[in-house]
Amino acid sequence: MRTLLLSVKFLALSLAVVLTACQSKPKAEQAVEKSAEENWVQLFNGKDLNDWQIKFKGFELGENFNNTFRVEDGLLRVSYQNWDKWGGQFGHIFYKGEFSHYRLRVEYRFVGEQVKGGPGWAYRNNGLMIHGQSAESMELDQDFPTSIEVQLLGGNGTDERSTMNLCTPGTNVVMNGQLIEQHCTNSKSKTFHGDDWVTVEVEVHGGEIIRHFVYG
């Protein structure tokens, strides 16, 4: 099994998310019990970050740089309120549990302006990193965990900018029988401009199949 984690790279001023996951059974068990029920588990409890580990580039594990990750009004919020400027401090928040066959559901939205000095590619840019290395195994100055990223993007009000794209920091995948070595591959989703909530899901069958869904 690999660690399921929510990755935060660099966003706008604030991102809010709601997380749930469904643990499904391996194929061998499904063959025996085809009618197995799916049991949804709320990964974020809406109260605190006790089930999560935080790692920022250049900081020791557990240091919540500038109080970036916080719980407000029952939401997991990624806020740049205390940042004066962008300095390359990529941050990630890891869930304590591990999953191999599951369906992850996320509701997210971007609000506010990008912090001063942020790179253009990072505008309204976040991600769910799955099949990733553990927080403890990351180097002090490592940008991103080795993982498969389900990229979450928000529109800029003008251009097409799909969400639920595939990015592969430190990894490669096979898609339609071909090895994919490019860093990011765009999905066919519409662009979500503005500050509205977006509901997405990732369906993972071990190391065999991963599917990305936007509103089903």
Image: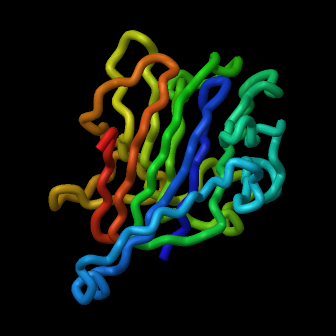
Going by the image, does 103 lie left or right of 17? left
Which one is in front, 65 or 197? 197
Percent of width and height locating residue 50: 77, 59
Q: Is residue 206 at least partly visible in the picture? A: no
In the image, what residue occupies the spot 46% across and 37% down?
A: 152
Residue at the spot 81% in from the left edge and 47% down from the top edge: 64
In the image: residue 47, left or right of residue 176:
right
118, 42: nearer the viewer = 42
Quadrant showing the C terminus: top left
In this picture, is 87 found above or below 201? above
Q: What residue is shown at x 48% (from left), y 30% (from top)?
A: 197
Residue at the left extreme?
177
* Image side of residue 99 versus residue 158, left or right: right
Q: Is residue 39 above or below residue 119?
A: below
Q: Where is residue 158 in the image (x, y as percent from the top left)?
A: 38, 10
Q: Can residue 133 be seen in this view?
A: yes
How many labels were placed on the picture? 0
What is the x, y in percent for residue 127?
51, 43
Q: In this view, does 58 lie above or below 28?
A: above
**Location of residue 194 in the rendering, given as x and y in whole percent from the top left corner:** 47, 17
Seen from the viewer's position, the closer of residues 38 and 166 is 38
